[in-house]
Image: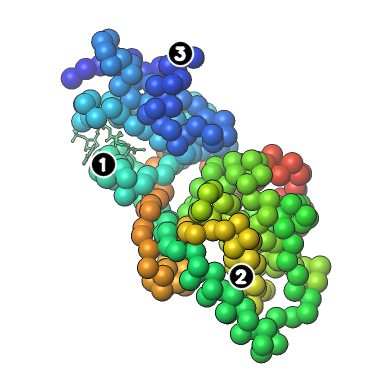
Amino acid sequence: MISPVIRRPRNAELPACRMLLPEAFGSPTRDFLLAVGQEAPYVLGAATLLRMPGALDGVLIRVVHTHRRQGIASRLLERMVDEASTLGASKIAGWIDALSDPAAEGFAAARGFHRVSRATTYESAARPFMELYWSLRRRLAERGRIPAAARVSALKDADRVAVARLWADYIAPDPGLRLDVIAHQLSAGSYAESPVLFSGDQLAGFLLFRSQGEHVTIDARVVTPRFRGRWASIVLTAAAADEAARRGAERVVFTWLEGVRDTAKMASRFPGEIRALADRYERSLGGRVPKSEDSAALRMVEAASKVRVNHHDR
Ligand SMILES: CC(C)(COP(=O)(O)OP(=O)(O)OC[C@H]1O[C@@H](n2cnc3c(N)ncnc32)[C@H](O)[C@@H]1OP(=O)(O)O)[C@@H](O)C(=O)NCCC(=O)NCCS
């Protein structure tokens, strides 16, 4: 068994890091580790993580094919766990795509992680999706079910503080969402045209979507409990469909969490393909219990949307 050195990458090694962990580049501040051997190919594996208060999150490890099953990923993980204990973190967590990385599940199970949620990402033709929501909205309007006070604005024109509060309440605590990805897209301005729904002055929800070429991706949808089960979700999604149509979207990509039956059921109405099975894995480290698990996520959205939110001042 080879014994690589585990250390932080040097500048010249960043391209190798990027090749092994392309999905980690472009995310907010991450730490990287490399496993380096004594002879070519030298870089045998790489790992990355996000430091959150009380936890190490977004853990991702990749080992070159020729050197798998030699304990390299385990060594990289051990180093991260050591760092976690120095930091007093109580948990180490990450995402695995069970579709593209079939080895991950066995590794995670062997190293003491357990799966806490699964997010299924689905892609289908945009037209039937948009038409369904337009027809649902039309039906509601014909029956007078959409209150006159209902109003949709684009995220860029909405009250960012109020939106950030909804984020903190409904998105940040959810272990099924890729917060780092969403926060990054927020800071990049990708969601600027996303619809935010009001009933009078009251914020009823928002939907975060972005487009890339012919694809529109819905990353998150929130409706506050008061407005659930009625018109709000349909008006919000139909508004996103209006914008998607303006952009000439051909394909729609959306994600649902295990247990969210209505979205899974909705997917079954549109022929399409599963694009990713994002499984969240966690391992408890028995460190101190962090005060607020979602505070790091909240900080991300604060930074991303350049607002200050006092989480407890609601
Ligand atoms: C998953 C991955 C990182 C494992 O790297 P590795 O260096 O081969 O892992 P290790 O040698 O440390 O494996 C430790 C244990 O995990 C389990 N394991 C690793 N790969 C496995 C596989 N393909 N199938 C089942 N179990 C596996 C085994 O129990 C293994 O111990 P053993 O070899 O003594 O049986 C590697 O396959 C990889 O890079 N895959 C693509 C990226 C990925 O899936 N990353 C997810 C982790 S965040």
Q: Amino acid at mark 2?
A: Ala
**Label 1 – label 3 distance at C-alpha:** 29 Å
Determine the quadrant in which ligand 1 lies: top left
Colouring scheme applied when the structure was drawn? rainbow
Foreground of the two, 242 or 169: 242
> Nearer the observer, disc 1 or disc 3?
3
Q: Residue at x 47, y 59 (%)?
A: 251
Dividing the picture into quadrants, the one containing residue 107 is top left
Q: Is residue 43 above or below residue 150?
A: above
Tell me what residue is drawn at x 43 percent, y 33 percent.
22
Say what secondary structure mark 2 lies in.
helix
Q: Which is nearer the eye, 310 or 178?
A: 178
Residue labelled with disc 1: 103
Of the numbered discs in the image, which one, if any, rests on residue 12? 3
Image disc number at residue 214: none
Three-letter code for the amino acid on which mark 1 is drawn: Ala
Q: Amino acid at mark 3?
A: Ala
Q: Residue furthest right?
A: 201
